Image (cartoon, rainbow, N blue to C red):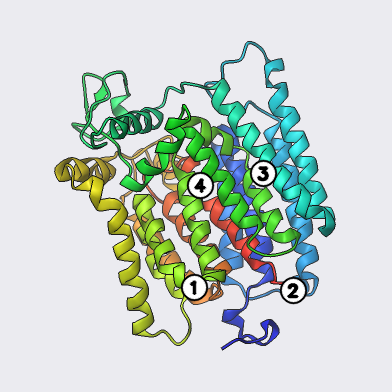
Amino acid sequence: MDTPFGALPAPERDRWTGAIGAVLAAALLGRALQVDSGHYRPEAVVWLSLAFAVLLVVVAAPEIPAVARRGPAAALWALAAGVTYEAVDLLGRPPGMYLRLEGRTDLLPFFLGVAAAAALAGLLLARESFRRVCFPLLLVAHLLLGVWIIRVSPDPRTDVHVFQRDASAALLSGHGPYGMAHPGLAVDPRFYGPGLVVDGHPRIGLPYPPLSALLSLPGHLLGDHRYSLLIATILAAALMGFLRPGPLAAGGAALFLFTPRRFFVLEQGFTEPYVVLALAFVVLCASRYRRALPYAVGLFFAVKQYGVLAAPLLALLLPRPLSWREVWNLAWKAGVTALAVTLPLALVDPPAFVRDVVLFQIQQPFRWDSLSFLAAFARAAGSPPPGWLGFLALLALTALALWRAPRTPAGFALGVGVVFFGFFAFGKQAFANYYLFVVGALCLAVSASAPEA
């Protein structure tokens, strides 16, 4: 039954307090990543703590009347401040680690592109009449900035880049991506589990699910699998920006695009842009195309291993009171979709698939260089804390989100943001790519909070 927005009970209504808090948390988290590209630094942990505290408060607290009265105007000002802060932060340091530059002046095209994109973002936030022109131009500007990053960093010395490059080549030659060798890749055994490195070379194929490998193929055909990551980023931002009419949705997309270490994640070849795109597709279907929601959820579960941990939060997208028929309908269709895109490549070599995609993640060691609360604790105590703390945080934050988050697409995205923030921050590994997914979820919550008209 359709109900006027103003007449919805509190749990069913998006809160402007939550939207503004998501903007602030995303900006603070972006700053934490900018300190040392998502690695441990005491300063970065301070920014991380501030972002997490803000997010906990806005999820748990009720609507603040003073904020609700100002609503969209306050959210627009928050977005303008956040995007401006991010754009200035982007100009403060090179956007990647392996850029082939002869001098700092070679960064001029990137800095000019950021300045032009920031001007476009300012215009679309300032006036509604500019949005239809400025937002597509903003997407084009960030597409060109991404192409520049890939071209000036053609061969980053990272394992994730090599894994995906070799997997794409194997698929095109008719072989499976699991169980393969990477003879040209030398890695530090400290960053791998016991027995996974022999003579300096990793003994795994592709540590990502098959959907990730399939999504990388178009980029590989264009000359670099990272073009697929770039396209996924732009598509995710486009879904955010067109999720609702008005400048707020476009502002949420801009906040995501200007996240400072987003270009670093692209350069390294991390696959989180696929996860953000899949989550954006879920939120879009929950908002407009309910019949496609189970299939979108299935793709989200299939694109990266941790996606399935968001399954309990799907209750925020289902009508109240919960019906077992609704739950079952969503579950079986999502499961079949996930299996349909996973099994064809997994069954080529099941033992290799299990070893690369499942056991590899379980065997990964505790990372002292993680940007996490556990890394800070370990450095103070001299030994890492138990690994189950991440799952304890996951359970506690899932319960909080199901209790307090609005039962709306925006509430779902906000719940995903807080749950995975805690899971990563209290886990054994947490780097820029993981937190970029959290930023994407928070920006989606902002975009989906905008009113329909």
Q: Is residue 285 depicted above or below 237 in this figure?
A: below
Quick one: label 3, few (<14), some, or many (20+) residues within 10 Å? many
Residue 345 in which image quadrant? top left
Position above or below: 453 against 161: below
Which callout, 1 or 3, points at the residue further toward the start of the chain? 3
Q: From mark 2 to mark 1, how far is it between C-alphas?
A: 28 Å
Numbered label attached to residue 290 = 1
**Closer to the eye: label 2 or 1:** 1
Tag 1 near tag 3, CB within 8 Å: no
Q: Which residue is mark 2?
A: 68
Residue that appears at 38% across and 80% down? 326
> Dot 3: what SS?
helix
Q: Is 87 placed left or right of 368 in the picture? A: right
Spatial CA span between label 2 and label 3: 30 Å
Which amino acid, by three-letter code, is at mark 4? Answer: Tyr
Residue 384, above or below 220: below
Chain-order first, disc 4 or disc 2: 2
Q: Position of residue 312 (x, y in %)?
A: 39, 69
Cα–Cα gap, marks 1 and 4: 28 Å
Judged from the image, the secondary structure of the residue bearing numbered disc 1 is helix
Q: In the picture, which quadrant includes the C terminus?
A: bottom right
Image quadrant in which you'd find residue 31: top right
| Circle 4/circle 2 CB separation < 8 Å | no
